[in-house]
Amino acid sequence: MDAKKSTWSLRILDFLEEAGQPYDDDCLAGALGATRRQTINAACNRLADQGKLVRQQALCPRCGRIKLHNFLPEWVDKLPSRPQETQVMPPRPPKLSPRWVEKRKAALREIEFIYQCSLNELEIQAARYGINVPIAISNEIDFLKKKLAEVRRELRELEQM
């Protein structure tokens, strides 16, 4: 049990160091693949008790809510006096492993294929309706075009790495 606790603690500290900005427990759990937010909360509380983390209310740039965030001690001088004044530190350029990049590109290619197939089917349906295309089909086509553009943008960025 202690090995698992220390593993989460090390993963949290490594992630925050790499991210270069504070994270709340919910966002940390998602980023680290924890199935229970409480696991991350308990590990962060232990790290705070050991002086390895500072926990303070801050505005989350990811969800827009004021939550308890985890700051590395060297960031203490950047802590806001009030949560509303929180400025997220500029992110460092990510250090992505080549293995991770290849896995992400493969996943994005699969997502791109699925989105494109769905878009093709919807465009066929829209053509059959002609001028009387249901709004749901029209909205879904717009949504898929937007998602395809996002996936293709991320793929281009990864190809340039």
Image (tube, rainbow, N blue to C red):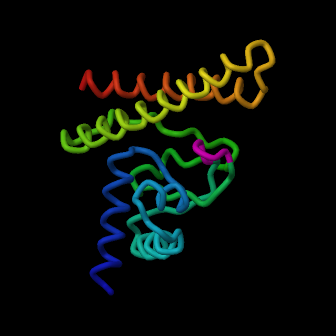
The total number of labels drawn is 0
Residue 158 lies, in percent from the top left, at 30, 28
User: Of 108 and 89, which appears nearest the observer?
Assistant: 108
Q: Residue at x 68, y 50 (%)?
A: 65
Q: Is residue 57 magenta?
A: no
Residue positioned most to the top: 131
Residue 46 sits above or below residue 94 on the image = below
Residue 46 lies, in percent from the top left, at 43, 76
Q: Residue at x 26, y 38 (%)?
A: 101
For the N terminus, give its image quadrant.
bottom left
**70 with respect to 135 (left or right):** left
Residue 5 lies, in percent from the top left, at 35, 78
Residue range (magenta): 60-64
**62 with respect to 102 (left or right):** right
Q: Is residue 62 magenta?
A: yes
For the C terminus, give its image quadrant.
top left
Residue 127 sits above or below residue 42 on the image = above
**161 with respect to 141 (left or right):** left
Q: In terms of image quadrants, where is residue 73?
A: bottom left
Q: Residue at x 38, y 45 (%)?
A: 19
Secondary structure that dominates the magenta span? loop
Residue 83 lies, in percent from the top left, at 67, 49
Residue positioned most to the bottom: 1
